Image (cartoon, helix red, strand yellow):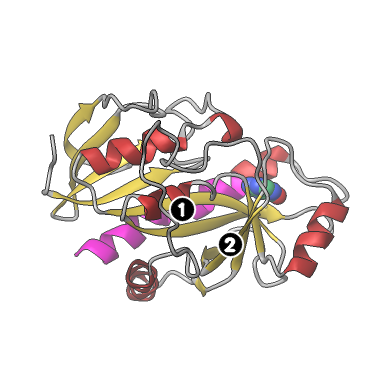
Amino acid sequence: MSNPLIDLAVIGGSGLYKFPGLENVERRAVETPWGDASGEVVIGDFAGRRVAFLARHGESHSLPPHRVNYRANLWALHGLGVRTVIGVNAVGGIRTDMGPRAVVVPDQLIDYTHGRYTSFCDAEGAEVKHIDFSEPYTASVRYRLLQAARKAGIAVIDGGCYGATQGPRLETRAEIARMKRDGCDLVGMTGMPEAALARELGLDYACLALVANYAAGCGDEDEISIEEIFAHLAAATAEVPRLLEAMLR
Ligand code: HPA
């Protein structure tokens, strides 16, 4: 089942349900011991490479962040022979320079989620692994993303701390104020446990965060509008294929 020919996998977040420009596509439904992945893995040619794509929320966005089967998703990609994964995540910006449409490659994270399956060390008799997670993202993949953005002329912010919240609701102003005090620069609902599970499987993993809105209390608005979130996301998402093309060529 292993497919050493897959150069990169992309897990698409809100606003990225299909990977534009994939050619010679095959779709793979992968069985996993953890249940069903968010959908079929779509594998195709892109920028002269073989790229796998999985829509984290399903292709019709039917899975909220706390219902995504992160274990099945990572297991499926690993089983197909994937070794490098980029998680594309919609986020809210906490730091002033991380406003709507900003593209960020974070270098740290804090996990505020709860009640999610966070490890593969759950099965009866499984080896207990205490992975090192001091640096939650793989430096070489972060570097490739940053270099690619520069090559493609896409403004990108290098570094930042991603705070992973439970969702699906957005946060209160007080929660964001606390996260800011904690050192978070961005807030999103899907960054964890994905990053930790990737590390458990030995996958190289980095996050490409697309800012959809200022987080609660960080912008001028009294309320965050979902229409605006999706409009900003669509604009930021439109840059992703060009960025990944620069990374792969
Ligand atoms: N909070 C959490 N997740 C998000 C946000 C937000 O403000 N915007 C996009 N994803």
Q: Which residues are magenta?
A: 231-249
Q: Residue at x 86, y 53 (%)?
A: 173
Tell me, for residue 109, which label it has, or none.
Answer: 2
235 or 64: nearer the viewer:
64
Q: Position of residue 38 (x, y in %)?
A: 41, 29
Q: Earlier in the sequence, mark 2 or mark 1?
A: 2
Q: Is residue 211 positioned above or below 108 on the image?
A: above
| Horizontal relation, residue 63 to residue 240: left or right | right
Q: Position of residue 101 (x, y in %)?
A: 58, 59
Q: Position of residue 192 (x, y in %)?
A: 54, 48
Residue 1 falls in which quadrant of the image?
top left
| Horizontal relation, residue 28 to residue 110: left or right | left
53 or 118: nearer the viewer:
118
Q: Main secondary structure of the magenta part?
A: helix
Tell me, for residue 195, which label it has, or none.
Answer: 1
The residue most toward the front is: 125
Find out whether residue 81 is within the magenta segment. no
Q: Amino acid at mark 1?
A: Ala
